Amino acid sequence: MSTRVDPLLSDYNRRMDSAVEVLSKEFSGIRAGRASVDLLNPIKVDAYGSLMPLSQVGTVGAPEPRLLTVQVWDKGMVKAVEKAIRESSLGLNPAIDGQMVRVPLPTLNEERRQELAKVAAKYAEEARISVRNVRRDGMESLKKMEKDGEISEDEHKRLSGEMQHLTDDHIKKIDDHLATKQKEITHV
């Protein structure tokens, strides 16, 4: 970030940056016309009694432009991997081939593009909520610091303004990421 952040607000800035990074990772999983191993990143598999990222139960590959494969390490997990992919919001129809799960990628029709744009918007709204929650935590912390005499009323007002500025900057980053992703999805 180019602007100087008050040391009292640096942790909140870091947490807001983290929300934007999570959004970027989620967006990398939204396919815009070509196979990408990142597409399956958000998928969690019910494995060994807990939800695990797909990457921890198999190797994801993209041998063809319209095909992803998951080489499952434990033969007993193949069905769970197939089910997790099928039940994800990605609209994929995986097929089991021995210890490998093949995931053919359908061509993107206009309806599917609109669905993916809605998924992207949902991810962006979750990121905005995370940023607002960080702002709320920060504002409560500043209020408590003023009440406890750690900062003056003027300092509280100044820091509250900076907190709002940080929030606005991060919300704008999220909106910019969303606009870019939606354009990528709808103009392939």
Image (cartoon, rainbow, N blue to C red):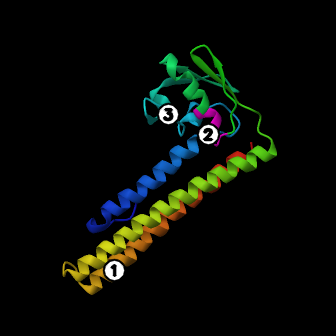
- At label 3, counting other C-alpha atoms closer than 10 Å, the crowd grade (few under 14, some 14-19, many 20 or more) is some
Amino acid type, residue under disc 3 in the picture: Asp
- At label 2, counting other C-alpha atoms closer than 10 Å, the crowd grade (few under 14, some 14-19, many 20 or more) is some
Q: Is residue 66 visible?
A: yes
Residue sitting at 29 percent across and 86 percent down? 154
Q: Residue furthest top?
A: 98
In this view, 69 is above or below 14? above
> Disc 3 and disc 2: Cα gap in Å?
12 Å
Q: Is residue 177 visible?
A: no
Q: Earlier in the sequence, mark 3 or mark 2?
A: 3
Give the quadrant of residue 63: top right
Q: Check residue 158 in the rendering and tell me which mark sits there, or answer none.
A: 1
Q: Check residue 62 in the rendering and tell me which mark sits there, or answer none.
A: none
Q: Are marks 3 and 2 in contact (CB under 8 Å)?
A: no
Residue sitting at 22 percent across and 79 percent down? 151
Magenta residues (range): 84-90
Q: Within the magenta stretch, is there residue 12? A: no
> Disc 1 and disc 2: Cα gap in Å?
45 Å
In this view, 156 is above or below 47? below
Pinpoint residue 57: horizontal percent, then vertical percent: 47, 26
Pinpoint residue 30: horizontal percent, then vertical percent: 62, 42
Amino acid type, residue under disc 1 in the picture: Arg
Residue sitting at 75 percent across and 32 percent down? 106
Locate the N terminus by quadrant.
bottom left
